[in-house]
Image (tube, helix red, strand yellow):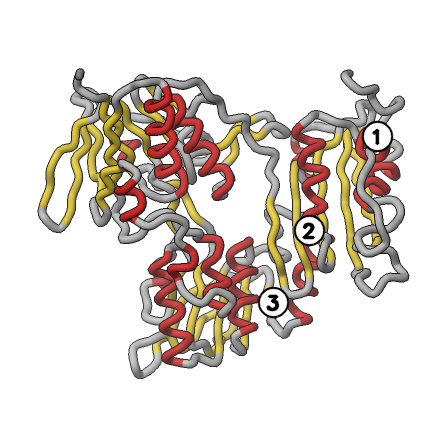
């Protein structure tokens, strides 16, 4: 028996552990010997960070319910997993990583290295105040549950109105708190939705009693007599608060890679090839990486668990001796704001125009089911196409139950390079409880008449 190849994985969440297990499976299938060591600075592994707002709300009973695979399960499957072990230095020439744990510092050698260091929340200086927390890790979720269950706060401020901010505001409002959501944008989710669609998100939050303050930033926080947050300075006035959610975004955690001389992309993340390779023997996957966007035709920072897990499997397959490629993204995302499902994919009209494209945007008001059915809720669909070519470029959906997942029709059309006319002619499911006779996404594509040209493509074209 020869000396096994050693894979060292830095980061033990979705991307890292997907890479670790896929590498083992591939190596075993090909008859190769592989030793896998994984280190992570945190105390938890393989959990759903996306579920944390719903744990805060009480929909999820325990943080354990968010864990997909425990540390012991990873170890039983053959991964030498070392938690609370931070990678502090990468020596690429020596093929080793310096790690730090409670027992001190040491070097771990490797033959192949996977960087899956994830992202870290952006925290302004004022965020280092008791009662102020992000919503990023399982420990954050546990801290929020302790605060909400034990201290019974009445007033919450949510800073940032992206996906996490909207979900946090909804969760805290459902817990009965008076919630103010503040964003420097002109509307919630204004960086990923058109202004008119984002306004519907604001209206949905307001219907559940969330106060939305736009075009405003938090200047500073004031503490109460107990040393915890007591008020926030918002522009020209002071807002009394008991707790603050910080949700102004995340950034790739890449300092060790930068110190090792690995370059970053335009959006601050690691940029791999389609096999998730950074350099000979060095791979990366997950929220520390930028992702190739098939619509924008450039790398973009889209930190999502779906990308992390798929990219991790690709990296693991290649490390294990197989051959796999990550096909990229089309920018699909979905969330909920009270009674509104909110989804988007592809480009926004403003993005397309910045790229010099001549585009047509069509907005359609419809319902999630046939209008005479009790299930029918209002739904707005916005579709973006390119004039002349008819190329489909993106879509947004805001509406009641059953609206959000309709975005997948457009996502798959973007994935396959279809035109708006192709989608308008597609055979989509219909029955009165589920859709009007003609699906609203298909109708919106049909109405983009100035964008498409010519008939839909024949099968196989």
Using a 10 Å C-alpha cutoff, classify the residue at mark 3 as few (fewer than 14 neighbours), some (14 to 19) or many (20 or more).
some
Q: Which mark is in front, 3 or 2?
A: 2
In this view of the protein, which residue sits in the foreground, 221 or 245? Answer: 245
Label 1 – label 3 distance at C-alpha: 38 Å
Q: Residue furthest bottom?
A: 225
**Considering only vertical position in the picture, is 238 above or below 389?**
below
Residue 291: x %, y % from top left: 50, 32
Q: Which mark is residue 404?
A: 2
Marked residue nearer the N-terminal end (1 or 2):
2
Q: How crowded is the residue under tag 2: few (<14 C-alpha within 10 Å), some, or many (20+)?
A: many
The quarter in which the C terminus is drawn is top right
Callout 2: helix, strand or loop?
helix
Q: Position of residue 101 (x, y in %)?
A: 15, 47
Q: CA distance from mark 1 to mark 2?
A: 22 Å
In this rendering, would 201 be left or right of 81? right
Q: Position of residue 91 (x, y in %)?
A: 19, 27
- Is the residue under label 3 in contact with that under label 1 (CB below 8 Å)? no
In the image, 333 versus 261, the foreground residue is: 333
Residue 272, picture quadrant: top left
Judging from the image, what secondary structure is the residue with disc 1 in? helix
Residue drawn at x 82%, y 40% as measured from the top left: 442
Q: Residue at x 65, y 36 (%)?
A: 346
Say which mark, if any, is on residue 421.
1
Which circle, 1 or 3, is nearer the viewer? 1
């Amino acid at each position: 028996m020869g000396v096994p190849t050693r894979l060292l994985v830095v980061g033990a969440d979705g991307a890292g552990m997907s890479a670790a297990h896929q590498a083992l499976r591939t190596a075993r299938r090909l008859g190769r010997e592989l030793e896998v060591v994984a280190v992570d600075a945190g105390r938890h592994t393989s959990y759903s960070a996306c579920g944390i707002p719903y744990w805060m709300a009480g929909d999820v009973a325990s943080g354990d319910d968010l864990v997909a695979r425990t540390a012991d399960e990873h170890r039983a499957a053959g991964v030498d997993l070392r938690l609370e072990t931070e990678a502090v230095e990468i020596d690429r020439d020596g093929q080793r990583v310096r790690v730090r744990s409670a027992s001190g510092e040491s070097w771990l050698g490797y033959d192949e290295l996977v960087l899956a260091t994830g992202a870290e929340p952006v925290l302004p200086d004022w965020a280092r105040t008791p009662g102020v927390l992000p919503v990023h890790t399982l420990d954050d979720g546990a801290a929020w549950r302790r605060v909400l269950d034990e201290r019974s706060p009445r007033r919450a401020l949510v800073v940032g109105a992206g996906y996490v901010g909207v979900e946090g505001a909804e969760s805290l409002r459902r817990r009965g708190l008076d919630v103010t959501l503040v964003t420097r944008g002109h509307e919630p989710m204004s960086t990923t939705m058109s202004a008119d669609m984002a306004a519907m998100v604001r209206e949905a939050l307001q219907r559940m009693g969330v106060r939305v303050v736009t075009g405003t930033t938090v200047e500073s926080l004031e503490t109460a007599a107990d040393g915890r947050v007591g008020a926030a300075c918002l522009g020209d006035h002071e807002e009394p608060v008991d707790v603050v959610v910080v949700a102004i975004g995340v950034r790739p955690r890449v300092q060790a890679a930068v110190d090792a001389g690995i370059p970053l992309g335009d959006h601050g993340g690691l940029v791999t090839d389609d096999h998730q390779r950074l350099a000979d023997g060095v791979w990366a996957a997950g929220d520390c990486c930028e992702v190739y966007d098939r619509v924008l035709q450039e790398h973009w920072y889209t930190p999502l668990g779906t990308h992390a897990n798929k990219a991790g499997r690709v990296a693991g397959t290649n490390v294990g001796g197989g051959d796999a490629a990550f096909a990229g993204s089309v920018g699909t995302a979905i969330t909920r704001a009270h009674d509104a499902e909110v989804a988007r994919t592809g480009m926004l009209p403003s993005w397309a125009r910045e790229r010099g494209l001549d585009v047509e945007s069509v907005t359609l008001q419809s319902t999630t089911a046939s209008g005479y059915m009790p299930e029918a809720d209002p739904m707005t669909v916005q579709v973006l196409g390119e004039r002349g070519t008819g190329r489909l470029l993106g879509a947004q959906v805001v509406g009641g139950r059953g609206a959000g997942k309709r975005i997948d029709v457009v996502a798959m059309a973007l994935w396959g390079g279809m035109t708006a006319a192709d989608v308008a002619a597609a055979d989509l499911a219909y029955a009165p409880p589920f859709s009007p006779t003609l699906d609203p996404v298909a109708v919106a594509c049909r109405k983009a008449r100035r964008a498409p040209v010519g008939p839909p493509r024949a099968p196989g074209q």
